[in-house]
Image (cartoon, helix red, strand yellow):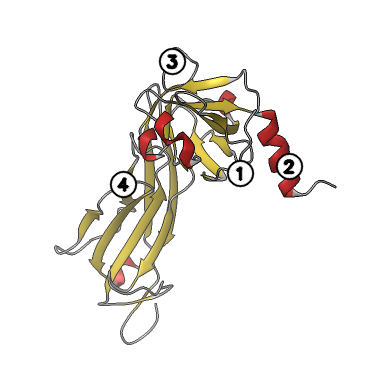
C-alpha cells in the first residue's frame, strides 16, 4: 500500500518536477446557485527558486474532474468555457477566482494550476474543490432573541419584552447578493418604535433584524423571512417562518 509520501513523489515525477509538496488552501466544497456565480477562495505556495517566474504575466488555470485537457478557466485565455475573473493577485499567491453563470453541468471537482515563466508550471493535484449546484437557494435561518445584545435564543416571550427576530442566510454569490424581506399575518400591529434593519453585508452572510416590543396582540402571529435572488433570467426565493408565543405578565395565553 502506497504511503502519502510515495503518492506525492509519484505525482511530482509525473509533472516533471523534483519537488517537495507545494500546499494550497481551498475549500473542500462550495455550494452554487444555478444561474448565479460562485467564488473560490484560494491561496497557494511555490518553491522559492521559482519566485522570479511568478510575474504579472503568470496565468491561473482551473481544471475540471482531473482532466488536464478540460481547462474550463485560464486567466490568460478568456475564450474558455467559464466566464469569470481571477480576483486574487497571483504575485501574492492569491488564486481566488469567481465564475459567473453557473449551471447544473458545472458540478464537479476543480484543481488549480499555476503557469508562469520558465519552469513554473504546476498542477496542485492533491487538493481540489467540489462545486455543488443547487436548483434553489437554501432556506434562511430565523431565530428569536430577547434583545439584540442577548445571545440566548428564546422560545416564549413575556409581554412588554424588547424582542429581536433575526433572519440570516448564506450569500452564495458575492457579486450579486440576495435580499431578505419580512412579512407577517395581518393581525400584527407593531409599535411605533419597531424597525427593520439590514446589517452590513458580509461576503458570506446576510442578516436582517426585526426589533419590536412584544404585546399580547402578537400571540400566534407568524413572521416570515424570504430570501430572494435576482438572477439574469429568473427570480428565485426560499422562506422560513417563526410563530410568536406571547405570555401575559399575569398569566399564560
- What crowding class fits label 1: few (fewer than 14 Cα within 10 Å), some (14-19), or many (20 or more)? few
* Circle on res. 77: 3
Task: In the displayed orientation, state which residue is furthest to the front.
Answer: 49
Separation of marks 1 and 2 at Cα, in angstroms: 12 Å
Look at the numbered disc 3 and give the secondary structure of its residue.
loop
Query: How far across and down, in percent of the image, does residue 166 sit?
Result: 34, 60
**Residue at 70%, 40% in the rendered image:** 9
Separation of marks 4 and 3 at Cα, in angstroms: 40 Å
Answer above or below: position of 148 versus 110. Answer: below
Q: Mark 4 vs mark 1: which is more N-terminal? A: 1
Quick one: 218 or 95, which is closer to the camera? 95
Quick one: 100 or 161, which is closer to the camera? 100
Quick one: 25 or 12, which is closer to the camera? 12
Separation of marks 2 and 3 at Cα, in angstroms: 32 Å
Quick one: 88 or 33, which is closer to the camera? 88
Look at the numbered disc 1 and give the secondary structure of its residue.
loop
- What crowding class fits label 2: few (fewer than 14 Cα within 10 Å), some (14-19), or many (20 or more)? few
Q: Verify CB contact (< 8 Å) between mark 2 and mark 4.
A: no
Answer above or below: position of 221 versus 84. Answer: below
- What crowding class fits label 4: few (fewer than 14 Cα within 10 Å), some (14-19), or many (20 or more)? some
Task: Return the residue at label 4.
Answer: 181
Amino acid at each position: 500500500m502506497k504511503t502519502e509520501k510515495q503518492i506525492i513523489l509519484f505525482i511530482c515525477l509525473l509533472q516533471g518536477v523534483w519537488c517537495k509538496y507545494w500546499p494550497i488552501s481551498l475549500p473542500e466544497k462550495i455550494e452554487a446557485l444555478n444561474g448565479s456565480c460562485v467564488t473560490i477562495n484560494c491561496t497557494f505556495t511555490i518553491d522559492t527558486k521559482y519566485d522570479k517566474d511568478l510575474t504579472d504575466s503568470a496565468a491561473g488555470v482551473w481544471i475540471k474532474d482531473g482532466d488536464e485537457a478540460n481547462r474550463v478557466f485560464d486567466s490568460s485565455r478568456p475564450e474558455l468555457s467559464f466566464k469569470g475573473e481571477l480576483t486574487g493577485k497571483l504575485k501574492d499567491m492569491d488564486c481566488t477566482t469567481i465564475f459567473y453563470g453557473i449551471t447544473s453541468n458545472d458540478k464537479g471537482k476543480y484543481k488549480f494550476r499555476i503557469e508562469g515563466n520558465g519552469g513554473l508550471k504546476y498542477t496542485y493535484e492533491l487538493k481540489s474543490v467540489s462545486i455543488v449546484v443547487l436548483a434553489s437557494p437554501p432556506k434562511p435561518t430565523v431565530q428569536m432573541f430577547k434583545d439584540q445584545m442577548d445571545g440566548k435564543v428564546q422560545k416564549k416571550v413575556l409581554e412588554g419584552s424588547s424582542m429581536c427576530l433575526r433572519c440570516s442566510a448564506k450569500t452564495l454569490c458575492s457579486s450579486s447578493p440576495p435580499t431578505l424581506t419580512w412579512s407577517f399575518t395581518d393581525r400584527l400591529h407593531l409599535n411605533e418604535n419597531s424597525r427593520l434593519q439590514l446589517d452590513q453585508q458580509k461576503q458570506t452572510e446576510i442578516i436582517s433584524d426585526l426589533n419590536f416590543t412584544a404585546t399580547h396582540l402578537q400571540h400566534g402571529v407568524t413572521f416570515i423571512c424570504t430570501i430572494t435572488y435576482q438572477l439574469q433570467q429568473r427570480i428565485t426565493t426560499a422562506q422560513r417562518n417563526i410563530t410568536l408565543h406571547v405570555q401575559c405578565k399575569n398569566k399564560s395565553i
